[in-house]
Image (cartoon, rainbow, N blue to C red):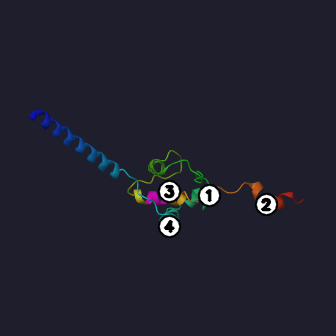
């Protein structure tokens, strides 16, 4: 009977330690929240606009508007880009917080309206 109680206490203690360690690991792996304002400053500082345009939809670089990447995917991509011309931004150059800020700013960009939805453009195109 005493052995059963001791065994139960050991199982409970080990289980509690395991749960606490998993909670700590998940908290350490949580991504930082991004600041749109800081992201805008960083977008200019790192000259992202030179390849992606000021609204992330033009230039020689990939269109960033409506990117399908989540924050972790974006951070992984800037750390190890798979395209020619995209510089590598290590964690030393762009820390995780700055990557989160850049991502937050990029997510504010909206798709441009379709050409058919721009009245002045339609007017000019229809003039002969």
Judged from the image, the secondary structure of the residue bearing numbered disc 1 is: loop
User: Residue 69 location, x and y as percent?
Assistant: 52, 48
Gap in Å between the C-alphas at discs 3 and 4? 11 Å
Image quadrant in which you'd find residue 55: bottom right
Q: Which mark is residue 17?
A: none
Answer left or right for 58 relative to 16.
Answer: right
Gap in Å between the C-alphas at discs 1 and 2? 19 Å
Gap in Å between the C-alphas at discs 2 and 3? 32 Å
Q: Which residue lies under the disc numbered 1?
A: 110
Task: Indicate whether 54 appears above or below 25.
Answer: below
The mark that comes first in sequence, 2 or 3, is 3
User: Residue 10 location, x and y as percent?
Assistant: 16, 39
Task: Indicate whether 67 appears above or below 8.
Answer: below
Gap in Å between the C-alphas at discs 1 and 4? 17 Å
Magenta residues span 98-103
Label 2: few (<14), some (14–19) or many (≥20) C-alpha neighbours in 10 Å: few
User: Residue 95 location, x and y as percent?
Assistant: 40, 58
Instruction: Please identify the residue farthest to the right as the structure is shown.
Output: 128
The mark that comes first in sequence, 3 or 1, is 3
Task: Indicate whether 111 appears above or below 83.
Answer: below
**Quadrant in which the N terminus is drawn:** top left
Q: Is residue 93 visible?
A: no
Q: Which residue lies under the disc numbered 4?
A: 37
Residue at point 49%, 53% (across, down): 87
Answer left or right for 49 relative to 100.
Answer: right
Judged from the image, the secondary structure of the residue bearing numbered disc 3 is: helix
Gap in Å between the C-alphas at discs 3 and 1? 14 Å
Are circles 1 and 4 on residues that touch, CB within 8 Å?
no
Q: Which residue lies under the disc numbered 3?
A: 103
């Amino acid at each position: 009977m005493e052995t059963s109680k001791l065994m139960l206490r050991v199982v409970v203690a080990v289980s509690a330690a395991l749960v606490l360690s998993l909670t700590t690991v998940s908290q350490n792996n949580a991504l930082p929240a991004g600041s749109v304002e800081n992201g805008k400053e960083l977008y200019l500082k790192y000259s992202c606009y030179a390849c992606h345009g000021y609204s992330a939809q033009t230039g020689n670089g990939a269109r960033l508007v409506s990117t399908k990447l989540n924050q972790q995917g974006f951070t992984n991509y800037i750390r190890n880009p798979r395209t020619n011309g995209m510089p590598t931004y290590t964690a030393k150059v762009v820390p995780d917080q700055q990557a989160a800020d850049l991502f937050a700013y990029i997510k504010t960009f909206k798709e441009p309206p379709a050409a058919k939805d721009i009245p002045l453009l339609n007017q000019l195109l229809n003039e002969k």
